[in-house]
Image: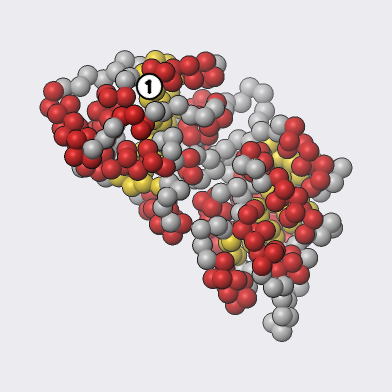
Amino acid sequence: KDVLAKAKTGTGKTVAFLLPSIEIVSKLPPVDRDVKRPPIHVLVICPTRELAIQAASEAKKLLKYHPSIGVQVVIGGTRLALEQKNLQANPCQILVATPGRLRDHLENTAGFATKLMGVKVLVLDEADRLLAMGFRKDIERIIAAVPKQRQTLLFSATVPEEVHQICHIALRRDHEFINTVQEGTEDTHSLVRQVHMVAPLDMQFSLLYVLLKEHIGDDVDYKVLVFCTTAMVTKLVADVLRELNLNVREIHSRKSQSYRTRVSDEFRKSKGLILVTSDVSARGVDYPDVTLVLQVGMPSDREQYIHRLGRTGRKGKEGQGILLLAPWEEKFLSCVKDLPITKAPLPSLDPETKKKVSLVECALGILFLILA
């Protein structure tokens, strides 16, 4: 049966759709090597490159004892010609893709549409986010390109009206609705200790430095995500923290996909590291054992705040979240007033710290107006 599954972030959705998909592929008769365009049997659509790479990586782990089943990923930010070559040369029964790049292949890769006619399982992961990012037309095009006789698995953290509309197109009428968000169960974010602080912009780098130093002092295995509002601010914050001799990496849209993948993998495997990031890491990406999520600036909405926070406190573990706002951003708190966020006093800034941070700010030529 087709399935619409409502599930919170951090609850193992990826394995939930990969295991049955792999089982279906493993039971299919092997494809003759002489077949010119061997079919793709499982198509997984993810909203971001990072999520697609992560899903493909999980699939490869699960296929350790099924070497004949191939997994490939097609995403924006990489050369289309290289992906075309890989699809031609290597087995690909399971394909993980972002919507835009999949459409590129449909329109520009010879024989690709034929390969999709073998799809037995279509997975739409993070469906609400796919739609929020403007991929509706791409999704409709993809649904039209795969056989009607297939199983469709649609996963979504929320089920607004737009998701219901896609369900009418993608799922059979007798599909199963599975709601894993039961009344009375704790949300992922309820396991996270949350505080907010309000401070003028000219204090924020000093405060950020002090908050990070305190956390590092409390936990030798610290693993911190610092979320910023834009790619430019992300780079600026990373530059400042790096000059202050903190162990920092950065991910944002101005970095190449190969760089982002490398840094993401490093952070996933590391301890004692701070990752400064834009919202490319906000949802679904699984970084184990994140000890602190620090959000600098006002999130665009309540959902963004929750999804950022969801990078810590995953799989039943405790976590900590700090929201650092400028005075004019304090209005955001009304959007999350029902969440357990308490106001925290600003940590004291000693003259030596102020001077140290000020010297870095001057060296980098920082103008606080660009943070607004």
Residue at 75% across / 32% down in the picture? 161
The answer to whether residue 211 is left or right of residue 111 is left
Residue 23 locus on image (x, y percent): 70, 60
Q: State the residue at coordinates (60%, 71%).
A: 84
Please report the residue visible at 16 percent of the width from the left and 34 percent of the height from the top.
359
Count the labels in the image: 1
Residue 326, horizontal then vertical, whole percent: 37, 21
Q: Could you tell me residue 49's position as x and y percent? A: 54, 52
Front one among 30 and 99: 99
Q: Is residue 148 visible?
A: yes
Furthest residue in direction bottom, as rendered: 34
- Which residue is at 73% across, 36% downward? 162
| Residue 283 horizontal side relative to residue 29, left or right | left
Near mark 1 (Cα within 10 A), the count class, few <14, some 14-19 or many ≥20, is some
Q: Residue furthest left?
A: 352
Q: Which residue is mark 1?
A: 326
Q: Hey, which quadrant is residue 363 in on the image?
A: top left
Q: Position of residue 252 (x, y in %)?
A: 43, 46
Residue situated in front as seen by the camera: 238 or 18: 238
